[in-house]
Amino acid sequence: VQLQASGGGLVQAGNSLRLSCRFSGRSFNNYNMAWFRQAPGKERMFVAAVRPKGDTLYADSVKGRFTCSRDNAENTAFLQMTNLEPEDTAVYFCAAAWFEPFGSSLRLVSTYRNWGQGTLVTVSS
């Protein structure tokens, strides 16, 4: 599996960005897709995830502001981020994990074997 994240940049607080994660190498429909972020000096933290059929999961800190989705025809996952805050500044990573009905929590870093290279999001106040 190869993952290519894109879409990061510098924005002012209150604005929006959309991240994309292009998936290749396996059947996209068999994978959960997730977004994590890592701020300088901090651990990598769960942001959002989307299962193959489109049901989603969010961290409390982004619920209502971020939307995670996927386009199975385009093998791409998205993270639409609105009303961005300086606290959202981080490197954002997309990740993929084989779908299992009773598998490990999608909120855990350890669940994912496949990671993209990260894209930097900087939100200025």
Image (tube, rainbow, N blue to C red):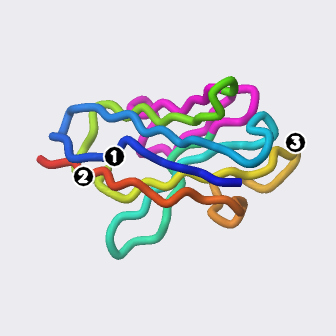
> Is label 1 or label 3 in front?
1
Image spot of residue 90 (x, y percent): 34, 58
Image spot of residue 82 (x, y percent): 33, 31
Amino acid type of the residue tagged 3 in the rendering: Pro
Looking at the image, which residue sits at the far bottom?
41
Mark-to-mark CA distance, 2 and 1? 8 Å
Residue where numbered disc 1 is placed: 8
Q: Picture quarter containing residue 104? A: bottom right
Amino acid type of the residue tagged 1 in the rendering: Gly
Q: Helix, strand or loop at disc 3? A: loop
Image spot of residue 33 (x, y percent): 65, 43
Image spot of residue 107 (x, y percent): 63, 53
Circles 3 and 2: CB distance less than 8 Å? Answer: no
Image mark for residue 101: 3
Of the residues under marks 3 and 2, which one precedes in the sequence? 3
Of the residues under marks 1 and 3, which one precedes in the sequence? 1
* Residue at 61% in and 29% down: 70
Residue situated in front as seen by the camera: 55 or 61: 55
- How crowded pointer 3 is (Cα within 10 Å; few <14, some 14-19, many 20+) is rated as few
Q: Magenta stretch?
A: 50-71
Q: Helix, strand or loop at disc 1? A: loop
Amino acid type of the residue tagged 2 in the rendering: Thr
Residue where numbered disc 2 is placed: 122
Location of residue 12 with respect to 88 vertically, above or below: above
